[in-house]
Image: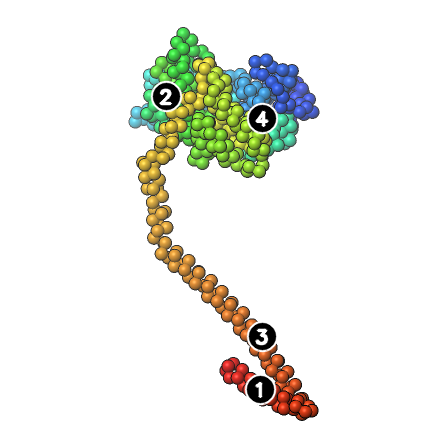
Amino acid sequence: MFRKIRRYITILRVFSKYNLFSLLYSEVNQYYVSNRRTPCVLDVKNRENAVKLRKALEELGPTFIKLGQILSKRPDIVPAIYIEELGNLQDNVNPLDFDTMKVAFEGFRCSIGSEQISESLENPGFNILDIFDEFNTEPIACASIAQVYEAVLNGKKVAVKITRPNLIDTINLDLAILDDFKPLIVRLIGLGSNFDIGAFFYEFRELLNRELDLSNEARNIKRFQENFADVKEVHVPNIYDEYSSENVLVMDYMEGVTIRKLSQVSPEKKKWYAKVISTSYLKQVYIDGFYHADPHSSNIILQEDGIAYIDFGAAGTIDDELRRNMLNLFYGIYKKRGDVVFEAFLKITGINREDINVRRFKLDLDDIISKQNYSAGERQSDNYATLALKYNLSLPSEFSTLERALILIEANCLELDPKFNLLENAKPVITKVLMKRYSPFEAFEYLQLEGDRYLEIVKNLPEGVNDVIETIRGYRIERLEKKSDEIRRYRTIDSIAKYVFLFGILVSSTYLAVNGDGYLPFMGTGGFIIAILLFGIMFLKRS
């Protein structure tokens, strides 16, 4: 309880320091005329507020930094000016000394040759550094979740990633406080009305759980290795499982330079790097359905013969249905088919035509198609999120995360090639996916997978047909019986009516035969005889 109160005081102090409370009484103006090259007064004002928020989140530590980073991947719900600034969030933390960090090696187990090592740091004679040929205790990368060290293992250069100690208690405390601050966060960042804050925090907790367990990152790396086994231009580090655990990850050190440090390279080579990056990423999205979710410039290493991806803590997956709709969206833009793009976007967002202004929406889609096909040197990947924000549409979180990743990829490629156009590089991938989707081999594989199910259906078909026939027969008999009941009911009513009518004739004829004058007794006698005869005929028919 006291820890929570102290943390509340710290958060309120930081909010006061950056004057964030004033943002609660101001609207985030999103709909105004602006130009990226010549910002207007509203641009400057919103930028200042976004910078204040970024600095406050950095000062509050790992949980709030991760919160800002995940919000920066949701351009469908957060205004563009905040997206851009939150994308600059850095894990601005001071490195911990190695003596503090090495508690991650407690219970460390590994095998060297046929010898099994199982040691604990509580053993005064055990030094984890003895496992490595060399180990630089000064971190080469320092973040709020983990620190990365450079070492040499069995003569090979490796990177050793170690989680920072005592993080879980701090993060759980911050999550409890953030749960209390839900309405404040919605107001502070100007989130759209379609934003489900409860679902967002659930995804946020899941993200933190995955990043705190380095074995998840190890699995991601192995999956990427399998997906790019036949692509010689893309390199993925090997994992040393015998030295890795939930808190420690030992992998190959990827030599090379980052995009921003690239120099003395010809424009043609830069264009080649941009093409390798874009095509490899589109492969991840549209073919593999498994992609690197944080491909900023520091996580892509440029090498002489290709590129290498690093830091696989954040990875995204796309199910078949969303991937198919996204491919249709890209295909419609590639073929300049507005109707295809419109239908694909409706399926992605899950909305009905009646819920939007279709005419205006199609005009905006036509503008996106024009930009994607005829613009060069401009970022285009955030167009869909801007459209969703304009019409207050809720994009799937998977789509939003992917779009944020595509924005980073596009920015990296534009830095290498100022005339880069993502769609031009996407065309071969789209063609390949479509050929694969409708190939005879794919159809045959589908029939193989579904064959048992269809065989079961065919086998049960006679029984099913028989059930249908019996159902129809039963229905017809039921209707026939119902009709028969109605006929009997009507016949009974008709018979009663006839008996009443004849009884009336019989009584009248009797009266005329007894009390009538002149010819009336003869008529009464004739009517009486006829009535008796009809009574007899009806009785015989009834029998």
Q: Residue at x 45, y 11 (%)?
A: 261
The disc placed on residue 530 is 1
Q: Amino acid at mark 4?
A: Val
Give the residue pinned by disc 2: 234
Asked whether disc 1 touches disc 4, contact meaning CB atoms under 8 Å apart, the reply is: no
Tell which tag, 2 or 1, sits nearer the viewer.
1
Q: Residue at x 49, y 68 (%)?
A: 481
Q: Residue furthest top?
A: 264
470 left or right of 180?
left
Q: Closest to the observer: 492 or 430? A: 492
Circle nearer the N terminus (2, 1):
2
The disc placed on residue 78 is 4
Q: Amino acid at mark 3?
A: Ile
Instruction: Determine the CA span between mark 2 and mark 4.
Output: 33 Å
Instruction: Determine the CA span between mark 4 and mark 3.
Output: 77 Å
Q: Residue at x 50, y 19 (%)?
A: 379
Instruction: Determine the CA span between mark 3 and mark 2.
Output: 91 Å
Tell which tag, 1 or 4, sits nearer the viewer.
1
Tell which tag, 1 or 3, sits nearer the viewer.
1
Circle nearer the N terminus (3, 2):
2
Q: Amino acid at mark 1?
A: Ile
Give the residue pinned by disc 3: 493
Tell which tag, 3 or 2, sits nearer the viewer.
3
Please state the horizontal and vertical placement of residue 417, each as a whole percent of the image.
Answer: 44, 14
